[in-house]
Image (cartoon, rainbow, N blue to C red):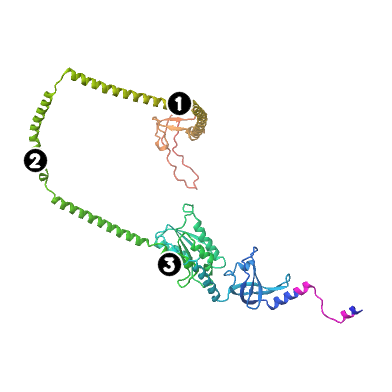
Amino acid sequence: MSETASESRTNAAEYTVSEISGALKRTVEDVFGNVRVRGEISGYRGPHSSGHAYFALKDDRARLDAVVWKGTMSRLKFRPEEGMEVIATGKLTTYPGKSNYQIVIDNLEPAGAGALMALLEERKRRMQAEGLFDAGRKRLLPYMPRVIGVVTSPTGAVIRDIIHRIKDRFPLHVLVWPVRVQGETAGAEVTAAVNGFNALAWDGMIARPDLLIVARGGGSLEDLWGFNDEALARAVAASHIPVISAVGHETDWTLIDLVADVRAPTPTGAAEIAVPVRADLEATLASLGARLKAAVSRNFERKRQAVRAAARALPSPDQLLALPRRRLDEATNRLGRALSVSVDRKRARLAAQRLTPATLSRRINETRTLTGRDLARAQAAFFAIVRERRARFSRTATRLSPAPIERRQKLQGDALTALSRRQDRVISVRLERLRGQLTQAERLLTTLSHKAVLARGFALVKDADGTVIKHAADVASGMALSLEFADGTADAVATSGPARPKPAVKPAAKTKEPGNQGSLF
């Protein structure tokens, strides 16, 4: 009785959990259908595997869960980062599964340029501490590159300006890596392009560029934010190919401008820095060629004058030959006396020599001894050489075997047999081909021969000399003719000349003048 009385004393409605959750969801979404919330990003770990991003917005006193769906994430102008102060536009809703509320973000923008500048300054400070901005690590640009790689949008005016300027100054091969230059994926695409150019091989199918240009037109800080990406700046710093940064106008600065090897004020300026002016090079080359020609000419003239001066200082041939001629005359005078003295001296020495049989015997014995010793040495050397040759022959004979010769002979025989079989096949195929060509030519000759025409009832008219008559005007009265038919020839005589043309007949007369027809028999 007490429970029944207690229930009758209250008029409160009874809800299920789902009903109260749905009512709260509708209330929150109706009241806060579209809101702008300013706060600091907390707990951001990048997009989920599904493409959605989950994080929170917080200030010094509260925290609000946030979600960015995959479709919205791809349209954001910049990527969220941990600790960034942003202004989020979206609608509030509840999540019944956890009894909490959250904001579904439709647009995300930094909370003023100050937040982006603070983030940019923090990146600059960290990368400068690592030495990525030092001038000592920057590479020199090639003076005359063969291939230039350009990383930019393929549809903008930037690529047309760069190609036009390069074509005007020094035409060469340009490789374009198309990328987005604005939006969330801009930094990642440009990073992939820089790394892709560096991954090309020098001798590959696609030539590796000697120089890279990263270019984009001007814009706001948010538009150029993709080129402040830390991964992109590190990729440009680690590039083995020299990089020219040409992002924005002259007053715009990004991170890659600080790490690139050279910064150009504009994309057109980057093309001017990348290549020299071909006309200026040709003019300089022509000037240097003219200077070289003039210098060679002057050097030849100077050498020629030096030779002439030296020739004037040299003595005449008579002066040069005077002393040798005098010495020759004196030697000629001494030669006769020297010969007489030498003959007398030889005669005296010969007279002093006393030839006896004992002296001759002693000389013969000495010569015989020397000859015997030399003969013994020669025999010993001969036997040594024979022994050495015999040993060498024995060593070589042990290595010789008829097996390799027989094996090679067998291989050559097999090859000869195969070639013989191939020769027979080739000759047969060749004869069959020639036989077919001959048959075809014979068929074509039969088709084109006048014999086939004669077989259809026609005749070939010839004169007495055998010349073919083609026109009736060539036939005279009494002319001997030869008629060739398909089965033989027949002689004939023309009884009249060619027929005259028929006169014009009026239609009303309905008469026809007989022509002067000739007959052949």
Nearer to me, 100 or 340? 340
Q: Position of residue 112 (x, y in %)?
A: 56, 76
Residue occupying the point 37% across, 62% down: 277
**Residue 65, placed above or below residue 509:** below
In what element is the residue under mark 1? helix
2 or 3: mark nearer the eye: 2
Residue at the far bottom in the pictured view: 9
* Quadrant including the N terminus: bottom right
Nearer to me, 316 or 95? 316
Q: Position of residue 333 (x, y in %)?
A: 7, 35
Closer to the N terminus: mark 2 or mark 1?
2
Please say whether residue 95 is one of the residues in the magenta stretch: no
Amino acid tagged 2: Arg
3 or 1: mark nearer the eye: 1
Residue 269 numbered mark, or none: 3
**Residue 310, placed above or below residue 332:** below
Residue occupying the point 15% across, 53% down: 309
Please say whether residue 11 is one of the residues in the magenta stretch: yes
